[in-house]
Image (tube, rainbow, N blue to C red):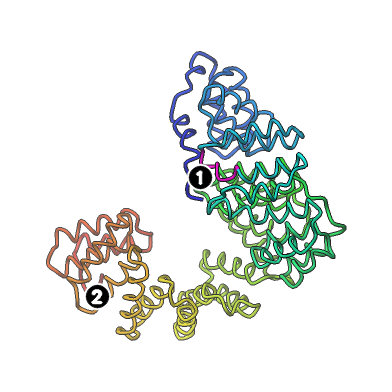
């Protein structure tokens, strides 16, 4: 998905520009919209940008802001109007073609959708053109499967084409060996793909895709009735939702919103897309709108628990720790709680310093089927360590490293813990040296191994690695402090203070006084 990151580059250039046409008009609406935008009040921002665009209908800068906010709040009339302004100016970001296509298809305007698909050529989204072309052919009564099989998909296109091909087979009424073979291949994939295929086959036909797949899949299975017709809008909505889920994360929130919104334009009842949209809206800095989006999901939906998990994350990110803890606790203490829900509650307890309580929850998550999870054993071990129960923590950290012997994080954590608690120094070095081979670019690993060398008396060797760590992560407080300590031991006192000053910039409150004392007094037995 890396090429998609470029989709917002044109938009970024526009955002950095001053609104030219608006300079001669009343900027009150625009200024208020910007303020609301910065405050995360997406609804107010969208209305303000809409009024500003009406006052200056040819300004592409205002149009871009209006377009982005409109997609967040679901004002498709404003989004379409703003996109037209940017297209007329020749500066529309490529994702406007995706939105235009979805709007056209939802309105039954297949020629309009085909025109929008043509605009994708040469953009980061052109890998989707074969899939769109095949569906549009199928919608005209042609064989979409034959079309998609005849086109060069590329690696990224194949990632999304396989489920679409299976849906096209079902749309053709081919519930035969070809369709079954295609679905069987996908049945071992992610849960959402299985749900997409099962939904159109109904409860009886979808049982082999969902049965025994866990609480959510069982809930989906119980909600299914008769088979549903497979349409171009259903197929492409599922694809847009899958792409949005794949992107995720705050850094790609803008594009995730576009894709999730396209899924909802095509299928307004796509609850999973609404959950992804809420998560992305939160990542874009509008937690209240994210919570409103989640509130629209029915409590009896098979995906209600998934939505509740996102709600916990939104509340946590918004600094509403008590509400997040209350919601997470309700999920974790429910009889049908999954290991992930128990783990999520434990993580929140850890974040608030309740390490003993967190340790009990991690143990519960392990008992509920998480025994094979290296991450769970790691988190359990760290909670026990922070709770002062090192003898119990060590076996859990060892188990995490045993389950994931090629993950540098597991090896680094165990190695550092052994050193900090006076464990086997030779074993710790072996673990850290192995972690370094696995992740030679990882600054935390370089810092841990370098500091281990320093503590073993190989100060010059350790300082070289610590220098590498600080070059990779100049703002790293721990690595800079360790480097300062190493320099001081080597008699390089001026450089030591320089490193400690760098460490002090981003030091946590608990570390700030120790680093300040080193800057005043140098390295002493007390520091």
Q: Is residue 445 above or below residue 32?
A: below
Label 1: state its secondary structure. Answer: helix
For mark 2, what is the residue? 453
| Drawn side of residue 469 relative to residue 45, left or right | left
Q: Is residue 127 magenta?
A: yes
Q: Is residue 335 visible?
A: no
Toward the top, the furthest residue is 24
As drawn, the label of residue 41 is: none
| Drawn side of residue 479 relative to residue 457, left or right | right
Residue at image location 58% in from the left, 56% down from the top: 316
Q: Is residue 374 above or below residue 79?
A: below
Q: Is residue 20 visible?
A: yes
Residue 421 spot, x, y in % from top left: 36, 81
Q: State the quadrant of the C terminus.
A: bottom left
Callout 2 crowding tier (Cα within 10 Å): few <14, some 14–19, many ≥20: many
The quadrant where residue 65 appears = top right
For mark 1, what is the residue? 4
> Mark 2 or mark 1: which comes first in sequence?
1
The quadrant where residue 226 appears = bottom right
Residue 446 spot, x, y in % from top left: 30, 67
Label 2: state its secondary structure. Answer: helix
Relative depth, front residue between 415 and 229? 229
Relative depth, front residue between 177 and 276? 177
Looking at the rendering, the stretch of residues picked out in magenta corresponds to: 123-129
Quote the CA–CA distance across marks 2 and 1.
Answer: 42 Å
Q: Is residue 92 magenta?
A: no
Q: How many marks?
A: 2
Callout 1 crowding tier (Cα within 10 Å): few <14, some 14–19, many ≥20: some
């Amino acid at each position: 998905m890396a090429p998609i990151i470029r989709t917002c580059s044109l938009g970024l250039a526009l955002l950095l520009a001053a609104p030219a046409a608006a300079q001669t008009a009343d900027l009150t609406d625009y200024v208020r919209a910007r303020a609301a935008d910065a405050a995360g009040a997406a609804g107010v921002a969208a209305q303000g940008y809409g009024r500003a665009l009406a006052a200056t209908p040819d300004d592409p800068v205002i149009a871009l802001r209006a377009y982005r906010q409109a997609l967040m709040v679901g004002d498709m009339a404003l989004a379409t109007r703003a996109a037209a302004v940017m297209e007329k100016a020749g500066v529309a970001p490529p994702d406007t073609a995706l939105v235009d296509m979805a709007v056209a298809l939802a309105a039954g305007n297949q020629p309009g959708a085909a025109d929008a698909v043509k605009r994708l050529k040469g953009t980061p989204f052109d890998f989707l053109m074969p899939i769109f072309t095949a569906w549009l052919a199928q919608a005209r009564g042609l064989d979409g499967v034959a079309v998609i099989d005849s086109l060069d998909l590329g690696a990224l296109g194949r990632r999304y084409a396989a489920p679409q091909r299976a849906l096209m087979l079902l749309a053709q009424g081919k519930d035969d060996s070809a369709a079954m073979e295609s679905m069987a291949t996908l049945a071992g994939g992610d849960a959402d793909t299985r749900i997409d295929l099962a939904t159109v086959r109904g409860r009886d036909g979808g049982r082999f895709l969902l049965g025994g797949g866990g609480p959510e899949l069982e809930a989906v299975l119980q909600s299914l009735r008769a088979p549903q017709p497979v349409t171009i809008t259903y197929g492409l909505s599922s694809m847009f939702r899958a792409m949005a889920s794949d992107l995720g994360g705050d850094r790609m929130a803008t594009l995730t919103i576009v894709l999730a919104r396209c899924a909802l334009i095509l299928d307004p009842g796509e609850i999973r897309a609404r959950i992804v949209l809420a998560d992305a809206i939160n990542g874009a800095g509008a937690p209240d709108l994210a919570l409103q989006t989640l509130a629209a999901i029915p409590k009896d939906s098979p995906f209600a628990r998934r939505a509740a998990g996102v709600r916990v994350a939104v509340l946590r990110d918004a600094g509403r720790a008590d509400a997040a803890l209350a919601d997470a606790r309700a999920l974790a203490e429910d009889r049908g709680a999954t290991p992930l829900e128990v783990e999520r509650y434990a993580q929140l307890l850890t974040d608030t310093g309740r390490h003993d309580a967190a340790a009990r929850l991690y143990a519960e998550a392990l008992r509920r089927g998480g025994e094979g999870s290296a991450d769970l054993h790691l988190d359990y071990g760290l909670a026990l360590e922070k709770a002062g129960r090192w003898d119990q923590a060590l076996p859990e950290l060892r188990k995490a490293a045993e389950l994931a012997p090629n993950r540098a994080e597991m090896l680094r954590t165990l190695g550092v813990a052994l050193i900090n608690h006076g464990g086997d120094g030779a074993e710790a070095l072996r673990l850290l040296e192995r972690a370094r081979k696995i992740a030679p670019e990882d600054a935390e690993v370089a810092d841990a191994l370098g500091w281990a060398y320093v503590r073993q008396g190989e100060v010059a060797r350790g300082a070289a690695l610590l220098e590498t760590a600080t070059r990779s992560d100049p703002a790293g407080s721990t690595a800079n402090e360790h480097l300062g300590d190493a320099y001081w031991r080597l008699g390089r006192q001026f450089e030591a203070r320089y490193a400690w000053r760098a460490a002090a910039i981003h030091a946590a409150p608990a570390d700030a006084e120790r680093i300040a004392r080193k800057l005043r007094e140098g390295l002493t037995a007390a520091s």
